[in-house]
Image (cartoon, coloured by chain):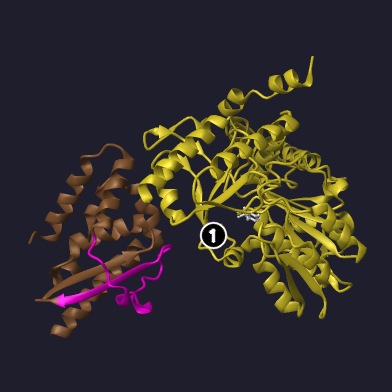
Chain colours: A brown, B yellow
Amino acid sequence: MASIKEIGQELIEEFEIFDDQMDRYEHLIDLGNALPEMKPEWKTEDRLVKGCQSTVWLYAEAEDQKVKFYADSNTVITKGIIALLVRALSEQKADDIIAEDLAFIDKIGLRAMLTSQRSNGLTAMIQRMKLYALGFKNAAQ
Amino acid sequence: MSTETKVTAALDLAKIRADFPILDQEVNGRPLVYLDNGASSQKPSVVIDALSRYYQNDHSNVHRGAHELSNRATELFESARTTAAKFINASSEREINFIKGTTEGINLLAHSFGRKFLLKGDNLIISELEHHSNIVPWQLICAEREVELRVVKVNEDGEWDLEHFYSLLDSKTKLISTAWVSNSMGTINPVEEIIEAAHKVSAAVHLDAAQAAPHFIIDVQQLDVDFMSFSGHKVFAPTGTGIFYGKEKWLLEMLPYQAGGEMIKEVDFGGTTFNDLPFKFEAGTPNIGGAIGIAEAFKYLMNLDRVALQEHEDAVLELATNLLLEIPGVKLLGPRNNRAGVVSFNIEGIHPSDLGHLLDAQGIAVRTGHHCCQPLMKRFNIPGTCRASFSIYNTKDEVHLFIAALKKAIIMLK
Ligand SMILES: Cc1ncc(COP(=O)(O)O)c(C=O)c1O
């Protein structure tokens, strides 16, 4: 399994291929569509991420000391953004997730959109993922 | 010469566009198409230059110094007031107050009118389509004064339900405050009828003209409206500017808003007297540069053929509406006709925020969301809309770019 930083670098390179903004979005949407399905019964009120303009659910399970994330959204673009986060953070160790600064996000050429998402919930999504990691870490101790 | 040729000669769109330097740029590799004028309009060079000229040559505080610069600043500031009075055809400069925007105008009115004229058992009328800034100040003052806040329903087309309005209006109605044009739908409200009905029961009317001022030729005397507020930044002027109009007979009776310098006649610990109109409502050093900027924006507009402008704006909006309605799954919010400046819509199965991102990726600036009208969104049971809002400088070519970009976005999102 590649590290979070390595996956982040991979994503930067993937997005670098495109020089048109629409193509980057297309790729982002594809990533969102490829997210593993989140079972409807997992989409409960307590798994809603507050602070997002669109509806976002996040759920995680611990598997062999690693954290596996499931997520969904009612908007296509936000789902793509969560897919980026899930790809980088899912199946990583709790400690690594907690320590990660996710610097790659700012380098994938979707700055304008992410600026609006940052105030609209990107930070809340990252925080929720780290909280899951922290919860599993504490439970394991 | 036919009027037709005169109109075309007067309305040189290329020249108007060139007056707004910001429009000439690329966003995400495409020419910028700015369709977020309902949120804020762009500024013509004459306004930008007037600000810079003022700060480079003429700035000092107003109404105070016995020196050349102060005199010049005062002269510019007060002549800005005269220009503003002319722009809305107020009968006197005493009825014009500079404010920082529509929001401040409404808060001023709620405070200064509310604490004077609203008594327990009275009622005040707004409607479902109001911007939050024309809701929340009234909720606060109504709670404080034990006054009932009545809300006129809008029909399926996003227009005032006049029957409901008449059922709410009674002899205890003291004030009606409503948008002239809805910011989220573009609906033009029947303000003449509302004003006439209000005056029959001696109620005053305040018009939130934030979305009307950029498009309409305003005549407060002909409207016979009691109060009006609008923001400068939506009418080609700097941010932090706006106009609050009130009939003198009301302003004389109303309580001051903020207190401090400028608004006083004489301060004494035994009792302070307030300054005459219009200074009574302008505590502290005003936004002098802003007033000069807003006056320059008014002059810019008044120098154009405004009838031709309005025809042009209507034609652009009509084209956008027609082309939108050809798109499968499109649903307009608001009436098909009877709108100004705004077309607000949803596409079935697509979240408006997704549309906003993909339009931005193609250089098209629109706004998505609830447009500060949460009660209205609840009324229609939608999370928000995608809103394209047009100004004098938008062209039919830009409408075609917008529609093409929208179609591309829809294909990607479906
Ligand atoms: C109808 C309406 N009323 C009030 C406002 C508030 O204006 P401002 O934020 O400039 O005070 C707006 C601006 O969005 C508006 O469109």
Image position, residue A7 (x, y; %): 14, 55
Is B324 left or right of B169, judged from the image as shown?
A: left
Q: Which residues, given as a range, are shown in magenta?
A: A35-62
Q: Which residue is mark 1?
A: B370
Is A15 left or right of B56, judged from the image as shown?
A: left
Which chain does the residue under circle 1 lie in? B
Query: Which residue, as the protein is rendered here, is positioned at the far left?
Result: A1
Point out the image quarter for the N terminus of chain B.
top right
Q: Residue at x 29, y 41 (%)?
A: A23
- Secondary structure category for the residue under label 1: loop
Q: Residue at x 80, y 71 (%)?
A: B168
Image position, residue A55 (x, y; %): 40, 66
Q: Amino acid at mark 1?
A: His
Is B239 left or right of B164, judged from the image as shown?
A: left
Q: Residue at x 56, y 44 (%)?
A: B325
Q: Residues within 10 Å of mark 1 (few under 14, many from 20)?
A: many
Q: Is residue B22 visible?
A: no
Image position, residue B327 (x, y; %): 50, 44
Q: Nearer the viewer, residue B307 or B185?
A: B185
- Image quadrant of residue B276? bottom right
- Image quadrant of residue A15? top left
